[in-house]
Amino acid sequence: MRSLEQKLIKLELKQRNEEGCRTEEIASRIAAALERNASTTDFKGLYEELVNLPIEPSFPYTEPSTLEAIQAERPDAPRELGVTSDDDEIYNRIYGGWLGRAAGCALGKPVEGWPKHRIDTFLRETNSLQLDNYLPFSDTYMSGVHKPSTRGNIRYMDRDDDMDYPILGLMALERYGPKLTPRSMASIWIANMSYGAVYTAEKAAYRNFVMSIWPPESASYRNPYREWIGAQIRADIFGYVAAGKPQLAAELAFRDASISHEKNGIYGEMFVAAMIAAAFVYSKSEDIITAGLGEIPAQSRLAECVRNTFSWCQHEKNWENVWVKINEHYGHYHGVHTINNAALIVMGLYYGEKDFEKGIVYTVRGGWDTDCTGATVGSILGIKDGAKSLPRKWVGVFNDRLLSAVGGENDNKISDLAQRTFAISRKIDSPPEKTSKAKLKGPAEGSWELQSAWGTQLLNFSQAIIEFTDMGSYATEDIPDPSKLASSSYNHPELKFSFAIDKGGWDYEVDFEGEIDDDTLEGFFYPGAQPVSGVRVSKDQEKQE
């Protein structure tokens, strides 16, 4: 049986080359190892060597993966645009985003992964080249599973991961609001999505969660898909709840993207979320795209691709001429990579500025990850135009119904999802404030009394222990002894620590993420996202400053 490293190493080799590493020498050794079916130990060694290759000094791009570094590399841009629409119009726009996303997704779903020439051949053979409705079904070209997404057969929006992720994001925001963290997002995934319903980077991240590899490490460990499109398709909900606030939308998107992606994989989600937030205010594609560029590193490959594509659009009347240039410059990326598919999104937005149908049709006809790109363009144009303005032939066929693989959300009214999204948007008016008044220095920060579903705990930073004093309904004959804190982070204003429970049949790691505000503490225990609150009951002398 091949090891995980053996299965992934060729993809990782390509990824490292795209990230700016010199890979010629190690590539030859990897090829030789594959040829002789080398041992698991050999492949693990080669993989570690590969992921630790330095970026070449001559690499012309700057591509960090932390929020602070990303924001430092952004161009100057307005971070809040000001929304003048009333609540009814905001809801209309949000509903339009959900409907538009469904329409673009359903249009692209039957031809997902097809290259442009195959799509064109299919359209000619079915007399559908003048694509003015959903694709016709053909059992010669398509699997029967795609029939519910074809012309004359649509009764609802069929299940697709492009529609699952906005629902997951909505659930996360409903639970955590602006305090959403990457770890909380991971918790939502584990609780509500099956491993079989996620793919590529998401599957790698999910595997890592199960192995107790949490964000941000979950995005990189044995994950050669970390710049693919998976995060980009998860962006929409974070734009829907941040009308006119591209920075807030991008920050929320970062917290989601960073659990499974790095570099341009993260930027793709931030870029789309910011564009959606801007589409509540702007009607011109140039302004919307510029707002998206304002939230990602200016010297990244994605930003360069977006700028190039938009320039080509401005100089070409025919979208197919732009597609040729996109393919020439970015066709070397995998068909589900962020960068090449983002170029198609820009193209679709440009030519669909005044025509929703042209936007989703031209995007899907461009090929590659058609359901993803179609969904994103449909979503942005749906926000811009609003539900009331969208063509009925494209959105009326769903009968206000969306199927999903998300636990507890398998069958939804699209209008209900829009209402829930609107309700959350009213609660997220600004990024979470950092309110801590004292910088945490280390383990000698006094003692705290915590309350959670597990009862009362005493947290003592001086001794670096946590003690369960009253476990309520969880009580057993053997109450766990005090546990030592580990992997602690006491950086202002966030607090993170871990401890192990191994007594009375319990044997697992518990993590805490939260904040301290003067003498109060709140956050969550993981796994399970158990809410925790507490108060400081004593201070150390050295804390008096």
Image (cartoon, rainbow, N blue to C red):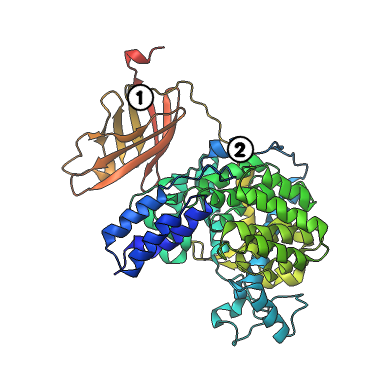
Left/right of residue 119 with respect to residue 496 in the rendered view = right
Q: Position of residue 194 (x, y in %)?
A: 42, 63
Q: Position of residue 279 (x, y in %)?
A: 73, 50
Figure quadrant of the N terminus: bottom left
Left/right of residue 208 with respect to residue 157 in the rendered view = left
Can residue 366 be seen here? The reply is: yes
**Residue at the left extreme, as displayed:** 477
Location of mark 2 (residue):
73
Label 2: few (<14), some or many (≥20) within 10 Å?
Answer: some
| Residue under the image location 73 percent in, 83 percent down | 124
Label 2 residue SS: loop
Residue type (three-letter) at the residue carrying disc 2 = Glu
| Residue under the image location 78 percent in, 61 percent down | 351
Q: Position of residue 376 (x, y in %)?
A: 65, 59
Q: Position of residue 313 (x, y in %)?
A: 78, 58
Quarter of the image where one finds residue 136? bottom right
Q: CA distance from mark 2 to mark 1?
A: 31 Å
Figure quadrant of the C terminus: top left
Label 1 residue SS: loop
| Disc assigned to residue 442 | 1
Left/right of residue 75 with respect to residue 321 in the rendered view = left
Residue type (three-letter) at the residue carrying disc 1 = Gly
